[in-house]
Image: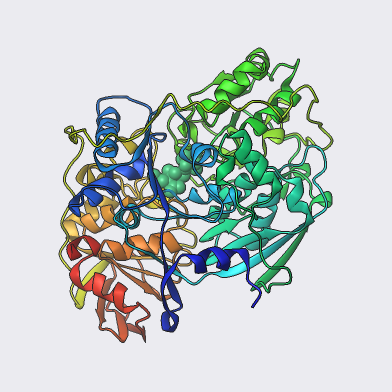
Amino acid sequence: MKETLTYKILNAHKVSEDLENNKMSIKIDQTLTQDATGTMAYLEFISFGLDKVRTDLSVSYVDHNTLQNGFMNADDHKFLQTVADKYGIVFSKAGNGICHQVNLERFAVPGRTILGSDSHTPTSSGVGAIAIGAGGLDVACAMAGMPFTIVRPKVVGVKLINKLRDGVSAKDIIIYLLGILTVKGGVNKVIEYYGEGVKTLSVPERATICNMGAELGATSSVFPSDEITKEFLKIQKREQDYKPLSADEGCQYDEDITIDLATLEPMASCPNSPDAVKPVSELKDIKVDQVLIGSCTNSSYYDFVKVASILKGKKIHKNVSLGIAPGSQQVLQMITKNGILDILLEAGARILESACGPCIGMGQSPATDAVSLRTFNRNFYGRSGTNSASVYLVSPEVAALSAVNGYISNPLGCKKLDEFSLDVDYPKCDSLLYQPEFKAEVVMGPNIKPLPKFKPIGHKFNAKVMISLEDNITTDHIMPAGAKVLPYRSNIEKISEFVFSNIDEGFSKRCLDNKSGVIVAKQNYGQGSSREHAAIAPRYLGIKAVIAQSFARIHKKNLINFGILPIELDINAKLLDEIEVSYDRNRIVVVNKSNNETYEKMNDLTDEEYNLIEVGGLLNTF
Ligand code: MIC
Ligand code: SF4
């Protein structure tokens, strides 16, 4: 039978299959963590009592909480470094770069499986790997050598034909796709790219596309591994990792989409959702206050070549603040060596650390009511740190040209300058990358609190509705990030004070006063980040079930991992209604006692998931 590339890689890693529930478990070759989810993941891994990781390669990155305002983040970094050294994990220190950019440069290998405690882990699929984002506990289990279970994904075949015009970017391809598929269109699917157009895209461009597959809710995205991949691995001095990989000619996809690259135009995701898509030509003349270029989506050397081509000899508009964060030390070294950095500085850019920074609300929050153009991947409400700001997601070309003009501008026709060759020497740049020596003692500063213990929720309970929500609630709504909250990622009691704080300040206190509760929502609850804090912190506050029309993949798994029952139902309930939930292996009954409505459905949890809820979560099974 002719196979898709997705199933070639998945089947080669298959450990077991549960056809009745449409699930498969796969061996994970490599893992990655970042600091904001990593401290929990490693506390969980340590609790398993193993002496070292069981993967081929595990890498721990520090890139999110690099703003060291107080001892908390620095404590976390020290903890992560000592854990890595002790348990056989490669450590990428703060300053080395954004986990996904560095992982692509240094570690991603065609044909491998990679599990990362960050939703944008699929960036590494740009080399022809299957890289998947997951909660920290799932990554901890993978580090312990356990297989990872997924819903057998449907495969969407995206055929790329022709070639992008000057000024049109890989970012425009994925934003365009978001306009077609929406933020829930990729759930339990892998987006597989093929066709003549693939050959016209470099690996960093492919990685940009795979990166924002996360915004579709997709399990992963994948590109073939071809001569361009070989060239990329060669310049990264790891040609030995190359292996050609592609789908069988004529294989069948579950869904088919064709994109003609030659007709695509610059696109933007408008406030406040990556799928609020418009062509840039329809947005022209909107005044811009801030432009930020960077993040794991668009911070490669390739991106800065295009930015420099536009900024060369120009000055940014006096009302615009332009911030630039190169994605890694390697990118920073390269733009320094070939004069791009000078061009950026002369244009008036502020150079930021090679880290996530403003993408996760760590600094650079825009002014009140400001318009901010970002080459990032998420523009959820409040994520920038300024609730009233309008955040647009765009390509590096749109960002650079708009910074010069002071209003949203269409770069169609802007050419890459020939003087910036892509064929340059890429420094290996390992000065902030540490191989484990299996020596260190784990250092746990006062910011790192023990994992909370949770009791099972029981088979029947009554609880009030603590919040009633709409479609597409993101994990940024549930568990906000930003400079104020992120330092408490290792302290569940403290971070739980901030649950839903951007949209409902009273939530946390209400839960504690009521001692238990349920959350009611509509479609695609928990989209976005992989942060398991969006499950642990509500559980800590007494949340026993989330009743929603549908869930995002990673968040649903996180809820189950921490013993919260996800119930897929569309119920009619308002704040403080009294809900009775009862369930067994076969069915779930939900009664809204406040309006006397009863809902009943088959229990669609697998045996494994049911067992986890019964014992109060995955950590109680060890
Ligand atoms: C994000 O982009 O939201 C993050 C911060 O990288 C998260 C992880 C986190 O919340 O720590 C993600 O995407 O998984
Ligand atoms: Fe970091 Fe932003 Fe990428 Fe998340 S999306 S990993 S915060 S750069």
In this rendering, would 284 be left or right of 41?
Answer: right
- Residue nearest the viewer, comparing 182 with 447: 447
Residue 539 percent location from the top left of the image:
24, 58
Q: Residue furthest front?
A: 240
Residue 324 appears anywhere in the view: no
Q: Quadrant of ligand 1?
A: top left
Q: Is residue 78 above or below residue 130?
A: above
Residue 293, picture quadrant: top right
- Residue nearest the viewer, comparing 438 with 344: 438
Q: Is residue 448 above or below residue 20?
A: above
Q: Where is the N terminus found, in terms of image quarters? A: bottom right
Question: Residue at horizontal 27%, vertical 79%?
Answer: 593
Q: Describe the colour scheme in one phrase.
A: rainbow
Question: Residue at horizontal 46%, vertical 65%?
Answer: 13
Question: Residue at horizontal 76%, vertical 38%?
Answer: 284
In this rendering, would 387 be left or right of 590?
Answer: right
Q: Is residue 80 above or below residue 570?
A: above
- Numbered-mark total: 0
Q: Where is the C terminus found, in terms of image quarters? A: bottom left
- Residue nearest the viewer, comparing 128 with 393: 128
Question: Residue at horizontal 40%, vertical 56%?
Answer: 134
Residue 407 appears anywhere in the view: yes
- Residue nearest the viewer, comparing 168 with 183: 168
Residue 353 percent location from the top left of the image:
48, 24
Residue 517 percent location from the top left of the image:
24, 64
